Image: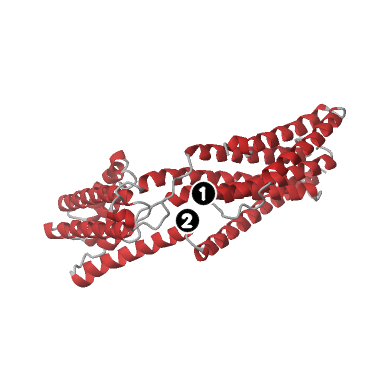
Amino acid sequence: MTRVIDGTGNDRATAGRLARAVDAVRWETHSVGRAARAVVRGPGRERDLLVQSLKAALAAILAWLVAQVWLDDPMALMAPWVALVLVQATVYSSLVTGARQFAAICIGALVASGAQAVTDGNTGALALSVPVLVLLSNWPRFGDQGIYAATTAVFTIASGTVSVDAVGHRLGQAALGAVIGVAVNALILPPVHLRDVRENLAALAREAGEVLSAVAGDLRGGEWDAQTAVGRLNAAKRLQDRLDALRSARGWSRESLRLTSGMLRKLHRAPTEALPPEDEDERLGRITGHVTALTRSLAVAADEERSPASPDPEVLASYGKLLELLGDSCRAEADRLMGEEDPGDPLLDERTAAAMRDLHTTLQEGLTKEAGQGAARTAVLGTLVLQAENLWADLNPEARGR
């Protein structure tokens, strides 16, 4: 009997892991498809990423042509390698990264050449120089470029040439690659990330609305169970990735305006309208937290091992109607952030507020009914009502100051 129970438990756990894996693969596939469609549809983060990737490839090809074809340098590999990695997200970061990387390459080449001259052998030179350079790569002044000191040492020792001319060639090629990489990034569609903040804000609101609508459909259709609840909870947790992207975009937007004034600013490819205030980041962050907490509470309510009794299905269906309205409000918020000319339903806020009051009354009545059936049900339903109220408080017009 014990083996049968254990086997059933293992099967259930395996099925759960498989379902989560399938859900993750489906999400990634949809993400790739959305990105590809966004590139074709028009300007946006996805097209910016494509442009930056093509610019990095162009910088590497130009560096190779100059170093190998034009200068006929036998150590031309260093130039395209450096040019490739210096097409960074902003012109400022390209310059900073270039300076750090060039310093790391210089140190790596000099230390490796000195070690090879002392040991007169590749193995000894590697043993003498690489541990020191790997340790040195952790120096904060190098940022994330310190590792190039060790990799340059490996290339230097592998080539077997330690003459002054050879070292000078390597450093010259590194400088050439740095100049070409920074020039390509600064002069060919220099990246200005003002749009990224707005698009990440709108995407966060829209994806939150999609999660709420999906949960609402499950509740209203009576298809809510533990497995479905876990899937929706995982989708809500992925909103945190979008929130992290928003915070990163906010930092990039500040940095991308450095060193891109005057003539370079005229070459930017992003719109220059004012950024949404940082208060919007905090508000959307709260909305994300409410959605995650809401789906977590529903997942707990659907788990028979954690909740003795879930709320009445009829009450959950009413809650689903409320979530559908909140999802519509999230999508309307996304349109507002993107400056859509079509306002959609101009009375959405009023209708949502009215429906919120009606559904809130229904849910309060259900809460009173549940109170007579035990504290556990009351606690679950009360938590759900409170989280919906918190979510609406961050979505309603008064909270937005509109």
Pick whichever, 347 or 142, lies toward us.
Answer: 347
Mark 2 and mark 1 lie on one chain; the one further toward the N terminus is: 2
Between the C-alphas of marks 2 and 1, the distance is 9 Å
Residue type, numbered disc 1: Asn
Residue placed at 38% from the left, 64% from the top? 54
Whether residue 309 is visible:
no
Q: Which residue is mark 2?
A: 45
Which is nearer the eye, 266 or 206? 266
Looking at the rendered structure, the number of numbered marks drawn on it comes to 2
Q: Is residue 256 visible in this depiction of the protein?
A: yes
283 sits to left or right of 130: right
Residue pictured at 20% horizontal, 58% vertical:
170
Depth check, front residue: 204 or 234: 204
Q: Position of residue 97 (x, y in %)?
A: 30, 49
Amino acid type for the residue under numbered disc 2? Arg
Disc marking residue 200: 1
Which residue is depicted at the point 21% across and 56% down? 175
Name the quadrant containing residue 74.
bottom left
Describe residue 262's horizontal placement relative to residue 24 as left or right: left
* Labels 2 & 1 near each other (Cβ < 8 A): yes
Circle 2 crowding by C-alpha within 10 Å: few under 14, some 14–19, many from 20: some
Secondary structure under tag 1 reads helix
Hey, which residue is sitting farthest bottom in the picture? 69
Q: Residues within 10 Å of mark 1 (few under 14, many from 20)?
A: many
Query: Where does residue 142 sit, x and y in percent of width and height?
Result: 29, 43
Query: Which quadrant of the figure contains the C terminus?
Result: top right
Q: Is residue 73 toward the left or the right of residue 57 in the image? A: left
Q: Secondary structure at mark 2?
A: helix
Q: Residue furthest left?
A: 164
